[in-house]
Image: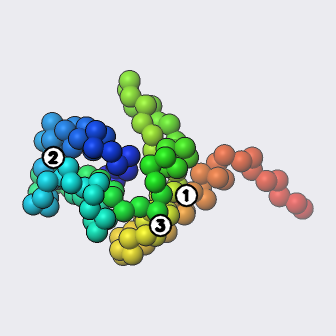
Amino acid sequence: MDVLVEMTDNNLRKAVAILKKAGYRAKQPVDPMGLADNKNIKAFNFYKNETRYEQVDIVIDSPINYKKASKNALKIKVGKLVLNVISHEDLIKMKKNTGRDIDKKDIKNLKVLQKGTKCLAGKPKKKKD
């Protein structure tokens, strides 16, 4: 999971504390509290268990800042929580920035999903005879 955090010390401290409380550990051997000042890191990875695929990246270098992403975010209710989930458009912009092969594949899948979502939202077109 990728997490985009407004890069203030207080928000970063909260995000790191939540991840640590949930059993996640920082993969990089540096203090995650210095993330806001390090412009060379694209993301900071936390993992829960090396044998399972449970990883969280705090996104540092993004073409979409937190304020813009928050404005365009989808509101998803999970139990009593309301989560802001980045829009398809903003996620695609973020993934284009990385240049990684996995993100290129994700972009293709997101575009297919985005197209399907638009079709579901609109009324089906009637066929002309």
Q: Tag 2, which secondary structure?
A: loop
**Residue placed at 66% from the left, 53% from the top?**
119
Task: Return the x and y of residue 115 as percentages of the image width and height.
Answer: 61, 59
Above or below, 29 relative to 86: below
Q: Tag 1 or tag 3, which sits nearer the N-term?
A: 1
Picture coordinates of residue 30, whole percent (x, y): 12, 58
Q: Residue at x 27, y 65 (%)?
A: 41
The kind of residue on which mark 1 rests is Glu
Mark 1 falls on what kind of element?
helix
Mark 3 vs mark 1: give the one in front: 1
Q: Residues within 10 Å of mark 2 (few under 14, many from 20)?
A: some
Residue, disc 1: 89
Q: Which residue is mark 3?
A: 107
N-terminal-most mark, 2 or 1: 2
**Residue 49 sits above or below residue 99 on the image:** above
The residue identified by callout 2 is 24
Question: Marks 2 and 3, how far apart in space?
Answer: 27 Å
Left or right side of 94 for 5: left
> From the viewer's perspective, is 1 left or right of 115?
left
Image position of 22 (left or right of 123): left
Q: Amino acid at mark 3?
A: Ile
Tell me the CA gap for discs 3 and 1.
10 Å
